[in-house]
Amino acid sequence: MSNPSSSSSSLNNGASSSTNAPAIPSDMTNVLTNEPGIYSDMASYTYALNRAQQEVGEEAASLRPVNTEKTYKNKQLEFLSWCELLPEPAVSRSLVSGSKLNFFLQQKVRGRKHKRQADKVIKYPTVCLYAAAI
């Protein structure tokens, strides 16, 4: 007759049930344990995250063709002016998120009259151009 405890220990090779928890990836341990030199608080982590997003955006903008940059510039400035009115911390106010972009397009672009032809309304392709520019 076999011992029930020996069969259960053979299933997990003698390891206790507490060692079955998933391991934290080694590249995440510094962030999670707040070791010195790594993001010691949420504010510095958030700032670094936002700064990285901004740097990637700036790099992408520097690689655009000149005519694309001219087309996008006024749309981007319009978005940034709108962002200045938002009740967000200054460090993240002008950073783009999906929800912020959607809100801008809904509030300021969609259904708006053309600037040059006031009898026409902005249509879908123009809204898409705003989204691409921002």
Image (cartoon, rainbow, N blue to C red):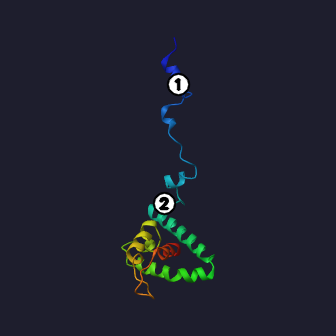
Residue 17 vertical placement versus 60 (above, below): above
Using the image as rendered, state which of residue 11 and residue 78 is in the foreground. 78
Residue beneath the point at 45% across and 66% down: 98
Position of residue 130 measured from the top left corner of the image (x, y, whole percent): 49, 76
Using the image as rendered, state which of residue 72 and residue 113 is in the foreground. 113
Residue positioned most to the top:
1
Residue beneath the point at 48% across and 32% down: 17
Residue 89 visible in the shown view: no
Q: Residue 35 vs residue 109: left or right?
A: right
Position of residue 36 measured from the top left corner of the image (x, y, whole percent): 53, 58
> Could you tell me the amino acid type at mark 2?
Ser
Question: Which class describes the residues within 10 Å of circle 2: few (<14), some (14-19), or many (20+)?
Answer: some
Real-space Cα separation, disc 1 to disc 2, in angstroms: 41 Å
Residue 128 visible in the shown view: yes
Residue 8 vertical placement versus 69 (above, below): above
Question: Which class describes the residues within 10 Å of circle 1: few (<14), some (14-19), or many (20+)?
Answer: few
Position of residue 92 measured from the top left corner of the image (x, y, whole percent): 45, 71
Position of residue 117 measured from the top left corner of the image (x, y, whole percent): 44, 87
SS under mark 2 = loop
Q: Which mark is residue 107?
A: none
> Which residue does the numbered mark 1 point to in the structure image?
9
SS under mark 1 = helix
Using the image as rendered, state which of residue 80 and residue 64 is in the foreground. 64
> Which residue does the numbered mark 2 point to in the structure image?
40
Residue beneath the point at 51% across and 66% down: 48
Residue positioned most to the left:
87
Residue 64 vertical placement versus 46 (above, below): below
Residue beneath the point at 58% across and 81% down: 69
Q: Mark 1 or mark 2: which comes first in sequence? A: 1
Write down the quadrant of residue 64 in the picture.
bottom right
> Could you tell me the amino acid type at mark 1?
Ser
Using the image as rendered, state which of residue 33 and residue 78 is in the foreground. 78
